[in-house]
Amino acid sequence: MTTRHTAPRAGLVLALVVLGLGPTAPAPGPVGQPGARDQPPVGVAAGIRGDPQRVTTEETATSSMAPGSSAAPEMTGDLATRPPLAELESTPIRRPLPTIPKGAVPILYYHRAQAPPPAYTSWSRARQRSFIAYDVLPVALEAQLDWLVAQGYSTILPRDLVAHWTAGSSLPPKPVILTFDDGFHDWATTILPMLRTRHMVAEFYLTLDAIRSGAITWREVRMLAAAGNGIGAHDVHHVQLAGLGSGRPAASPAVMWAEVSGARRVIAAHVGIAPDSMAYVGGGFNPDLERLVQKAGYTTARSIRRGIVQTVANRFELRVVRIGPKDDVTDLMTGSLVPDLPTFAARMHGVSDR
C-alpha cells in the first residue's frame, strides 16, 4: 500500500518480563467476571474449551477492567484519597540519546486511551494502580503523536514493512508503527480522530471476545479499516498460548490453530480484508505457534520483547517499545506533562527501563 507520512532493572526479574515468563494465573472464571492483575480483561478471555491456560504476562496482566468500561470493577481494600504526587510522577530519562540504529522501526505498544474519571481519587490504591497500568492518558497520547510529527516520523503498517522486505518497497526516512491491543470503543471515538488529524495510521490488534463482550463493535472496526488503518488479529479468546513459563505446558497445536486461524477468518468475514499481522496474546510464543501463524496466512507477528530494530528473519517476533501510562506524566488528574517528553524520546531511541 502507499506509505502514509505523517533504570534498567537487574537480573532474573527483567529476563522474566522480557521473555513473557511470569507466574500463571488461576483457572479462568466465567466471562463477565472482573479479573485480577494477572488476568485478562473481562470478556476478553474466559479460557479455551479443553485448554484453560490464561494470559499471564504484562500485556493483559495490567488490567482488571472490562474493555470499554469507563470505570474499574469494585475491589476490596480500604479506600484511599488521591495518592501523593510522588507516586504519580514519572522520572524523566535525562541522558544522552544513542544514535538510532540502521533498520530501526519502533513499534509502539498501547491498549486504550482513557483519562481517570473524577471518582478516581476515592478508589483504593489497588484499583488506581490497575487503571493507570493499562491506559494511556488521551492528553499524553496526543502529545506523543505530536512529538512524532515534529521529529519527522511517518506512520506505516506491518504490511508496509513486509513489502519493503519482500518487494523492495521504499519506507519513509523515519518510520514508526503504532499498535493498539484488544478492542475498545475509544479506538474509534478517541484514537481515530487523533490519527486522522495528523494523517497517521495504526495497527489495531483485535481479539474476538472484545466484540462478544461489547467492548467494541464491528461497525467501529470497519470505521478504523475504512480510514486506512490495519486490523490485526489478537486471537479469539485472548488466551496466552505459549511462553507460560517453566512447568507450564503450551496449548495444543489444535487450540493454537483454532485461535490464530479462527480470528483471521472471522475478521476477514466482517471487515472484508483478512488480517496480515497478529499480536501474541501475553507476548508468549514458541516455534510451533510461529509455524501455525505463518501457515494461517499472516506475514508478521508482534511480540512484546523490547527493541526498535526489526529484521525479516524475526518478522514473526517483532519487537516493541512499551509506552508506560506514567511516562512524562506528572499528574494524572490534570494531565500535566514533562516538557519535551524526555522519557518518550528515550524510548523512541531504544532506551527502555521496562
Image (cartoon, helix red, strand yellow):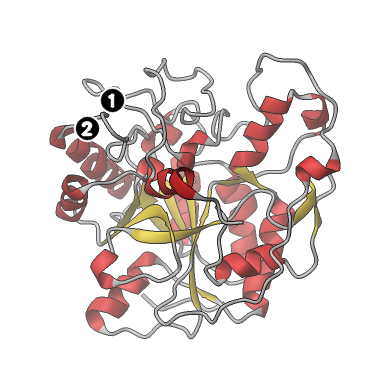
Query: Is label 2 in contact with label 1 (beta carbons under 8 Å)?
Result: yes
Distance from label 2 to label 1 (Cα)?
Answer: 9 Å
Residue 312 lies, with reference to residue 318, above or below; the image says below
Amino acid on which disc 1 is placed: Ile
Residue marked by disc 2: 251
Q: Residues within 10 Å of mark 1 (few under 14, many from 20)?
A: some
Q: Residues within 10 Å of mark 2 (few under 14, many from 20)?
A: many
* Residue name at image x 49 percent, y 34 percent: 61
Which image quadrant: the N terminus? bottom left
Amino acid on which disc 2 is placed: Ala
Where residue 274 appears, as percent x and y from the top left, is 28, 54
Residue 310 placement, left or right of 322: left
* Residue name at image x 27 percent, y 77 percent: 165
Quarter of the image where one finds residue 259: top left
**Dot 2 or dot 1, earlier in sequence:** 1
Q: Relative to the observer, which residue lies in front, 182 or 267?
A: 182
Residue 197 seen in render: no
Residue marked by disc 1: 48
Where residue 32 appears, as percent x and y from the top left, is 49, 19
Q: Secondary structure at mark 2?
A: loop
